[in-house]
Amino acid sequence: MTERKYPDLWVDPEDDPRQTDSSPRGEKAVLGEYLDHFRMTFELKCEGLDAEQLARRSIPPSSMSLLGLVRHLASVEFHWSRRFIEGHNDLDRPFKSPEDRDLDFNGAVADDAVVAEAWESWRREVAHAREVYERYDDLGTLVGPVGDESELREIVVHMIEEYARHCGHADLLRECVDGRTGQ
């Protein structure tokens, strides 16, 4: 690993994968880029940690951990793209259970297989959500079950808010693990 110019930052600004030379134009491009920025930020916050570090809980009695957040966000991506937008209500949400509504966090244990499953699920659901998003030109399109429809833009803005909030949680959790602070 090369030495960084700014060791207090996650990555040196010139190496930051979130920085692009393009400026998105139009509502769909802007919102899509913001959502992807926060997805990437979240992934960066978890980078380089082992199973024990990812599963480390915050402050008792909270069950929150970085691994729990990976599992939670996979479930959120699944819910909004597959169940709400596409209407596949027959599919079970990953990391959710009627017996344990907080299985995403409660099942986030320090095990390499659990970590691999969480990241695989999150990456699969993010890729699928991106495919779903690309199908729409008009963010004013109503999606969702009859009687509970929402404009697609409302869901995208909600997802941006969801990731932004959890990136804040991830900052604090990561700082507890190894002292690194956010960028």
Image (cartoon, rainbow, N blue to C red):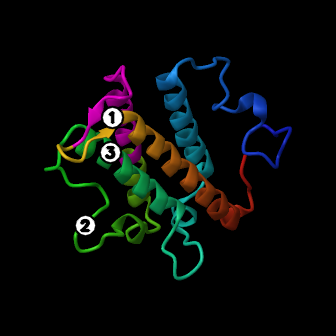
Identify residue for label 2.
Answer: 97
**Disc count in the image?**
3
Tell me the amino acid under the disc marked 2: Ser
- Depth check, front residue: 91 or 151: 151
Q: Is residue 182 left or right of residue 151?
A: right
Callout 2: SS: loop
- Depth check, front residue: 82 or 12: 82
Tell me the amino acid under the disc marked 1: His
- Depth check, front residue: 94 or 82: 82
Residue 116 visible, this angle: no
Q: Residues within 10 Å of mark 1 (few under 14, many from 20)?
A: some
Q: Is residue 145 left or right of residue 177?
A: left
Q: Earlier in the sequence, mark 1 or mark 3?
A: 3
Residue 128 located within the stretch drawn in magenta: yes
Q: Position of residue 150 (x, y in %)?
A: 31, 41
Residue 68 visible, this angle: yes
Residue 52, picture quadrant: bottom right
Q: Residues within 10 Å of mark 3 (few under 14, many from 20)?
A: some
